Image (cartoon, rainbow, N blue to C red):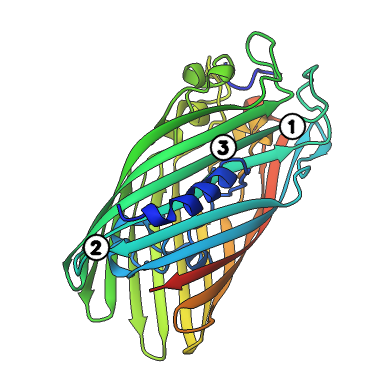
Amino acid sequence: MTPLFRFRLLPLCGLILAGLAGLATLPAHATNGTMPHGYGIASQGMGGASIALPQDAVAAANNPSGMALLGQQLEVGLAVVLPKPSATFGGTDFDGGGLKAIPVPEFGYVRPLDDQQSVGLSVYGNGVATKYRQSISGGAGSANDGANLTQVIFSPTYALKLSPTQAVGVSLDLAYQRFRVNGVPDVNGVEGQGYESSTGAGLKLGWTGEVLPGVSLGAMYASRIRMGKLKAYSALLADGGQFDVPERYGLGLAVRAPAGLTFAADVMRVNWGDIASLGNALTNPQPGFGWRNQTIVRAGVAWDVQPQWTLRAGYSHGTQIVSSDNTTLNYLAPVTPQEHLTLGATWKLDARQSLSLAYARALGTTVHGTGPSTGVDVRMSQNWLAAAWSRAW
């Protein structure tokens, strides 16, 4: 087989560091490339729609300006991902579901400094994980092919209200990643390199504004996070072990209607193809996954049924990342689903505390190999269950 790739937060520091230490060791399994369908439990229940609708202290992951519109609050959340990846090689099916349930925590805190300024921290994760029960590539060192990528992003944020209805924000995106591949030899015939890690940084900008009574728009831009090279995989990944977090940008709309209804929609672009390890074609001298840039459309509705209860539903659709002539390596990361159906709810426990829940179903999609990948089909579906506790002051 071809080788894989020829402020005022100090009182909470102890809690934050403990949570981050745990988060950095956990795998994630996403379906919009290495990213989940949304950040923040409330937005996950609305198909991920969030750019113009900040709902919780993880809002800086979606649009840093939203932190200026929330007031002081803390949120701790946990998702459990139940993935079902698989692949077919020459008519033989292989099950990539050796990882049954994958925990994905998240954390957020925001605090106003005065009537206009707020600071905060959102912590969230990306990643993909597969573990096959067989050796597919023929590597000698492992009977269980698979891959594990975990990316944790820390977004310390400053947000400013320009007026009661307009806000801007900026986040410094600090990232840590761990990477491992089993059962796939590099160009030197070496495999079993174990976990390797690196760090990097990027910048995120955002704006949110009410343009008509009850109608808000939002815009965000997140730069490419340039990560340090994964040195143990310098002969496996393109560009000597480079594996960056891609650039993304988007626009959002939120409409607050009568009867307690809120509608939200986003359009977002993620430039996966700009990362050589992800975008290089199978036939490239430094082959990659052959991922294409992706456009994601997501929409959701929230209904305040009672003062204590909010119900949510949503849908998202993304263009297909995996191209049919590059399926061969994508058995390690079969991020083929294009559609998500979601449900969510928030229960206000009292005047300050609430509990939010979300469920998402990533509909199964198969990409059939063509050209140099003829005979290799990859597929994946997923269930996503999440809960978060939040407290406001």
Q: Is residue 255 left or right of residue 166?
A: right
In what element is the residue under mark 1?
loop
Question: Mark 2 vs mark 1: which is more N-terminal?
Answer: 2
Between 369 and 260, the one lying in front of the other is 260
- Residue at figure coordinates x 40%, y 71% from the top left: 264
Alpha carbons under labels 2 and 3: distance apart: 48 Å
Q: Is residue 297 above or below residue 124?
A: below
Mark 2 = which residue? 113
Amino acid identity at mark 3: Ser
Residue 313 in the image: x percent, y percent? 54, 74
Question: Mark 2 vs mark 3: which is more N-terminal?
Answer: 2
Q: Which mark is residue 375?
A: 1
In what element is the residue under mark 3?
loop
Question: Mark 3 vs mark 1: which is more N-terminal?
Answer: 3
Amino acid identity at mark 1: Gly
Q: Quarter holding the N terminus?
A: top right
Q: Is residue 389 left or right of residue 139?
A: left
In what element is the residue under mark 2?
loop
Alpha carbons under labels 2 and 1: distance apart: 59 Å
Mark 3 = which residue? 323
Confirm or deny contact between disc 2 and disc 3 (CB under 8 A).
no
Alpha carbons under labels 3 and 1: distance apart: 14 Å
* Residue with the most extreme top position: 188
Confirm or deny contact between disc 2 and disc 1 (CB under 8 A).
no
Q: For mark 1, does the 10 Å Cα neighbourhood hold few (<14), some (14 to 19), or many (20 or more) residues?
A: some
Q: Is residue 391 above or below residue 24?
A: below
Q: For mark 3, does the 10 Å Cα neighbourhood hold few (<14), some (14 to 19), or many (20 or more) residues?
A: some
Q: Which-is-in-front pick, marks 2 and 3?
A: 2
Between 375 and 51, the one lying in front of the other is 51
Q: Is residue 239 left or right of residue 217?
A: right
Between 370 and 115, the one lying in front of the other is 115
